[in-house]
């Protein structure tokens, strides 16, 4: 995950940001950011789950004992549904 990914997720989560030269400089309003932070955290967790699932799937092509790769990837992705 790079800085642009983080910035995009912050905007998707509802943060009103001022971006200059690729940096987040602040929010446009004062107040309670509880919902935005919850949404941002959920996006970060989903991104990390997907990255982990892809590692499991890549194991399929690299090992003769790879039968569990798809099962592990599915289990990781299912955590987002719980």
Image (cartoon, rainbow, N blue to C red):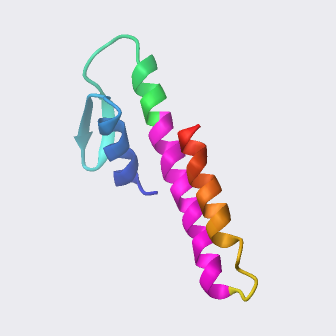
In the rendering, at what x and y percent does residue 47 appear? 48, 51
| Residue at figure coordinates x 25%, y 22% from the top left | 28
Question: Along the line of sight, which residue is nearer the eye, 73 or 47?
Answer: 73
Placement of 74 over or under 28, stated as above or below: below
Q: Residue furthest top?
A: 31
Q: Is residue 64 above or below residue 73?
A: below
Instruction: Please report the residue visible at 49 percent of the width from the left and 44 percent of the height from the top.
Output: 44
Name the residue at 55% across, 52% down. 48
> Could you say which is closer to the camera, residue 42 or residue 78?
78
Highlighted range, magenta: 41-62
Main secondary structure type of the part rendered in magenta: helix
Point out the residue furthest to the right here: 65
Q: Is residue 20 above or below residue 33?
A: below
Left-right relation of 1 to 28? right
Residue 18 within the magenta-colored segment of the rendering = no
Report the quarter where the C terminus lies: top right
21 sits left or right of 34 in the view: left
**Residue at x 41%, y 18% (from the top left corner):** 33
Q: What count of labels does the image hold?
A: 0
């Amino acid at each position: 995950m790079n800085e642009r990914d983080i910035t995009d997720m912050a905007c998707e989560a509802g943060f009103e940001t001022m971006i200059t030269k690729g940096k987040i400089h602040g929010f446009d309003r004062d107040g309670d950011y509880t919902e935005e932070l919850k949404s941002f955290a959920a996006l970060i967790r989903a991104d990390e789950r997907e990255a982990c699932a892809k590692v499991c799937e890549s194991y399929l092509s690299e090992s003769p004992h790879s039968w569990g790769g798809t099962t592990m990837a599915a289990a990781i992705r299912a955590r987002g549904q719980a």
